[in-house]
Image: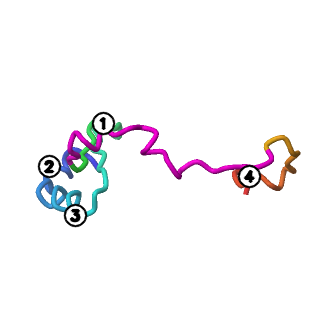
C-alpha cells in the first residue's frame, strides 16, 4: 500500500491490523518503506527459539534413500 493510501485510511487500517494480527507493508514509489504490525510483548519476542520451532520441522526417516524427480513437492 502506498504512503498516500495509508495516510488517508490510517485509523481504519490500524483497527484491521489489530483485529487480524496481520502485517501491512507501506511503500514509497513502489519500494517497501515501512512495516506496520501488531505490538507483541517482550516476553513473546524473547522466547526460546527452539520452543518457537518445536513441531515445525518435518522428519524424513530414510535420508539416504534415493528420491525420484517426481517425489519433490517443490517441482509440482
Q: Nearer the viewer, mark 4 or mark 1?
A: 1
Distance between mark 1 and mark 3 Cα atoms: 23 Å
Is the residue 19 above or below the residue 38 in the image? below
Q: Secondary structure at mark 2?
A: helix
Distance between mark 4 and mark 1 Cα atoms: 36 Å
**In-image side of 75 versus 3 (left or right):** right
- Which of pointers 2 and 3 lies earlier in the amino acid sequence? 2
Distance between mark 4 and mark 3 Cα atoms: 36 Å
Q: Residue at x 67, y 49 (%)?
A: 59
According to the image, label 1 marks what residue? 46
Distance between mark 2 and mark 4 Cα atoms: 42 Å
- Which of pointers 1 and 3 lies earlier in the amino acid sequence? 3
- How crowded pointer 3 is (Cα within 10 Å; few <14, some 14-19, many 20+) is rated as few
Q: Majority secondary structure of the magenta segment?
A: loop
Percent x, y of residue 60: 72, 49
Q: Secondary structure at mark 3?
A: helix
Residue 19: which disc? Answer: 3
Callout 1 touching callout 3 (CB < 8 Å): no
Q: Residue at x 26, y 38 (%)?
A: 34
Indicate yes or no whether the magenta region holds residue 63.
no
According to the image, label 4 marks what residue? 75
Indicate yes or no whether the magenta region holds residue 60.
yes
Q: Secondary structure at mark 4?
A: helix
Q: Residue at x 15, y 57 (%)?
A: 9
- Which of pointers 4 and 3 lies earlier in the amino acid sequence? 3
Percent x, y of residue 31: 35, 37
According to the image, label 2 marks what residue? 7
Q: Quadrant of the C terminus?
A: bottom right
Q: Nearer the viewer, mark 1 or mark 3?
A: 1
Q: Which residues are magenta?
A: 39-62
Amino acid at each position: 500500500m502506498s504512503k498516500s493510501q495509508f495516510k488517508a485510511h490510517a485509523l481504519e487500517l490500524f483497527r484491521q491490523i489489530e483485529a487480524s494480527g496481520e502485517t501491512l507493508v507501506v511503500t514509497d514509489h513502489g519500494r517497501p518503506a515501512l512495516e506496520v504490525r501488531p505490538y507483541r510483548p517482550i516476553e513473546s519476542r524473547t522466547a526460546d527459539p527452539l520452543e518457537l520451532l518445536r513441531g515445525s520441522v518435518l522428519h524424513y526417516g530414510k535420508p539416504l534413500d534415493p528420491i525420484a524427480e517426481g517425489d519433490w513437492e517443490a517441482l509440482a
